[in-house]
Image: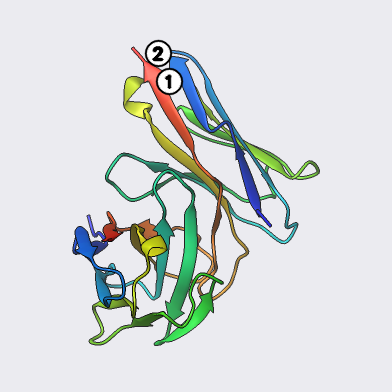
Amino acid sequence: QQQVKQSPQSLIVQKGGISIINCAYENTAFDYFPWYQQFPGKGPALLIAIRPDVSEKKEGRFTISFNKSAKQFSLHIMDSQPGDSATYFCAASITPNTGNQFYFGTGTSLTVIP
Amino acid sequence: EPEVTQTPSHQVTQMGQEVILRCVPISNHLYFYWYRQILGQKVEFLVSFYNNEISEKSEIFDDQFSVERPDGSNFTLKIRSTKLEDSAMYFCASSFARGTGELFFGEGSRLTVL
């Protein structure tokens, strides 16, 4: 059973446009939802994260929107730049926990065209 | 900035051979993880480790796999008898405390089984 479903698989956006990546989860016990950014040849790096007590979190050009009733959350990248071209993974976990497992989505390959 | 370091960056091995992947987590971190990513697919949890024992493991982490923290700094993943399907990028990660959620990933070790 896939705990976290992510779409789209790939996304091409013009420079300056808005990139939107969506995720849906199954387990209502999840209470921490991070987004990771991965450049080729590198490990995933935490970009932004949200907990279900808020519906939106913004950090610079990156915003997470969270819909608890629909069990969905999304990443919005405003004013997308070529340097944002990377693979983005959503994830979910249950906290607190010793060695909490993160369930990752399948990833979205974002290409921002200059 | 502290980082998780992994060696080797790439290892090629014959099917049936033993492989050890090494990681040095961030020094004050307490929780250690191994994830893997088959080319183009999602990041999959293998195992988490805390207080010198396995906290959680996935179905992927069968008897062919083992983890160890032999000297207080290194964290190793051993694959006893490699199979073709073990070919993947293996990521080590660490986190400081229970429930913070932020995993710091290494750059990965690419394992190719021939």
| Labels 1 & 2 near each other (Cβ < 8 A) | yes
Residue farthest right in this picture: A69
Horizontal and vertical percent position of residue A69 = 81, 44
Q: Which chain hosts label 1? A: A
Q: Secondary structure at mark 1?
A: loop
Residue at numbered disc 1: A80
Q: Is residue A55 visible?
A: no
Amino acid marked by disc 2: Lys
The mark that comes first in sequence, 1 or 2, is: 2
Q: Which chain hosts label 2? A: A
In the visual, does B13 lie left or right of A21? left
Residue at numbered disc 2: A15
Which of the image's four quarters has the C terminus of chain A? Answer: top left
Vertical order, A83 against B25 (above or below): above
Disc 1 crowd rating (10 Å Cα; few below 14, some 14-19, many 20+) is many
* Residue A111 occupies quadrant: top left
Marks 1/2: CA distance? 5 Å
Nearer to us in this view, B103 or B18: B18
Q: Secondary structure at mark 2?
A: loop
Which of the image's four quarters has the N terminus of chain A? Answer: bottom right
